[in-house]
Image (spheres, grey):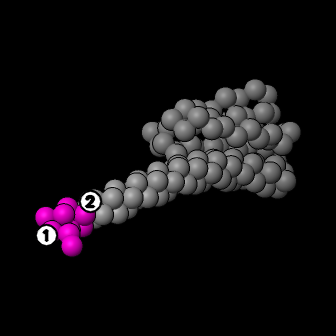
């Protein structure tokens, strides 16, 4: 028969082994959830920038479709932080430096588009 000290030692060792396995599994789960959240946030940021670009594009098409004399000012708040805008003819590129994502759009011909940047919003003025 084993003495009492040996039995206590064995129980303690088994408990520590089970606890170590539990902690290891917990760390693996936390790491996996962290990666899932990061990829979800990245995909969400891309969708937000895409939606912002589509809002600008749709407003430009609507004003240009209505013909001469139409003017519209669109204020687009950015949920992505600071945005930079690069214009090249009818091509416009929206870029979020903090998120390192961009979206390019083409504006319709015949419209004059002025894009002003404020702190966390784009103000876009369309006129035909």
Report the magenta residues as a range.
1-11
| Rendered residue at 40%/54% (across/down) | 24
Residue 106 lies, in percent from the top left, at: 80, 39
Residue 96 lies, in percent from the top left, at: 57, 37
Q: Are marks 2 and 1 in contact (CB under 8 Å)?
A: no
Label placed on residue 95: none
Q: Quadrant of residue 113?
A: top right
Q: Residue furthest bottom?
A: 1
| Rendered residue at 70%/34% (across/down) | 93
Q: Residue furthest top?
A: 88
What residue did someone put label 1 on? 4
| Rendered residue at 74%/38% (across/down) | 104
| Element type where label 2 sits in the image | helix
Q: Nearer the viewer, mark 2 or mark 1?
A: 1
Q: Residue furthest front?
A: 1
| Rendered residue at 75%/26% (across/down) | 88
48, 69: nearer the viewer: 48
**Is residue 37 on the magenta stretch?**
no
7, 61: nearer the viewer: 7
Classify 10 Å Cα crowding around label 2: few (below 14), some (14-19), many (20 and above): few
Q: Is residue 123 above or below residue 55?
A: above
121, 74: nearer the viewer: 121
Residue 99 lies, in percent from the top left, at: 55, 38
Most common SS among magenta residues = helix
* CA separation in Å, label 2 and label 1: 14 Å
In which quadrant is the C terminus drawn?
Answer: top right
Can residue 71 be seen here? The reply is no
What residue did someone put label 2 on? 13
In which quadrant is the N terminus drawn?
Answer: bottom left
Q: Quadrant of residue 21?
A: bottom left
């Amino acid at each position: 028969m084993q003495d009492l000290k040996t039995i206590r030692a064995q129980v303690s060792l088994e408990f520590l082994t089970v606890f170590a396995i539990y902690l290891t599994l917990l760390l693996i789960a936390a790491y996996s959830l962290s990666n899932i959240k990061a990829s979800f946030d990245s995909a969400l940021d891309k969708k937000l920038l895409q939606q912002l670009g589509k809002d600008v594009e749709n407003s430009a098409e609507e004003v240009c479709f209505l013909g001469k004399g139409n003017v519209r000012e669109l204020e687009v708040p950015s949920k992505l932080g600071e945005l930079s805008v690069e214009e090249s003819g009818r091509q416009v590129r929206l870029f979020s430096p903090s998120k390192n994502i961009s979206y390019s759009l083409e504006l319709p011909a015949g419209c004059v588009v002025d894009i002003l940047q404020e702190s966390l919003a784009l103000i876009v003025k369309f006129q035909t």
